[in-house]
Amino acid sequence: MKVISLMLLSACLYINPTFGQANAPNIPTNPSSPSSEYFAKGGIGLIKEQLYIDLISDRNELILPDGKRWVGQNASTPEVILYFKHRMWSLQALPEDFDLSQSIVVSFESSKVRFFDFVEMSGGYYKRSKRD
């Protein structure tokens, strides 16, 4: 009888993997890590819907949701910017109502561009394309 009970319990746990997890913390099952490499298409990298990185530009450059471009320093110059309330902000000029939890950080480096979306708690990096 004990063997049958154990087999039934095992079968229930196997069939329903969430059994016993009612009080488990709400942690994403597959968050992307800031060290996750993403692959661009045509020299354009997706950060989130309608926000892209131009990886072949000679400058640090993003394509914004309205189709306009944000252009920063030369691509060889490291630069960190924040996307908040549909605008790009430098670290020295943040608005008074700035909230990091509602922002995306983009770090332009010589060989890659890193990003982290604090709303989605996900991020990664793209390697910069070779310029001719």
Image: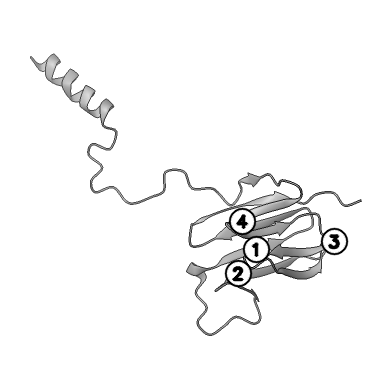
Q: Amino acid at mark 2?
A: Tyr
Q: Earlier in the sequence, mark 3 or mark 1?
A: 3
Neighbour class for label 1 at 10 Å: few (<14), some, many (≥20)? many
Q: Nearer the viewer, mark 3 or mark 1?
A: 3
Measured in 3D between alpha carbons, the distance from the residue under mark 3 to the one under mark 4, in whole angstroms, is: 19 Å
Disc 4 element: strand
Q: Which mark, residue 83?
A: 2
Q: Looking at the image, do the residues carrying marks 1 and 2 touch, with CB atoms under 8 Å apart?
A: yes
Question: x and y percent of residue 114 in the render?
Answer: 66, 56
Q: Which mark is residue 106?
A: 1
Q: Nearer the viewer, mark 4 or mark 1?
A: 4
From the viewer's perspective, is residue 6 above or below residue 73?
A: above
Labels 3 and 1 touching (C-beta < 8 A): no
Which numbered dot is residue 89?
Answer: none
What distance separates the C-alpha of mark 3 from that of mark 1?
17 Å
Q: Are marks 4 and 1 in contact (CB under 8 Å)?
A: yes
Residue at numbered disc 3: 58
The residue drawn where x is 87% and y is 52% is 131
Upstream in the sequence, badge 1 or badge 2?
A: 2
Residue placed under numbered mark 4 in the picture: 47
The picture quadrant where one finds residue 81 is bottom right
Q: Earlier in the sequence, mark 3 or mark 4?
A: 4
* Whether label 4 touches label 2, CB < 8 Å: yes
Mark 1 or 2: in front is 2
Q: Position of residue 46 (x, y in %)?
A: 64, 53
Give neighbour class at mark 2: few <14, some 14-19, many 20+ (Cα, 10 Å): some
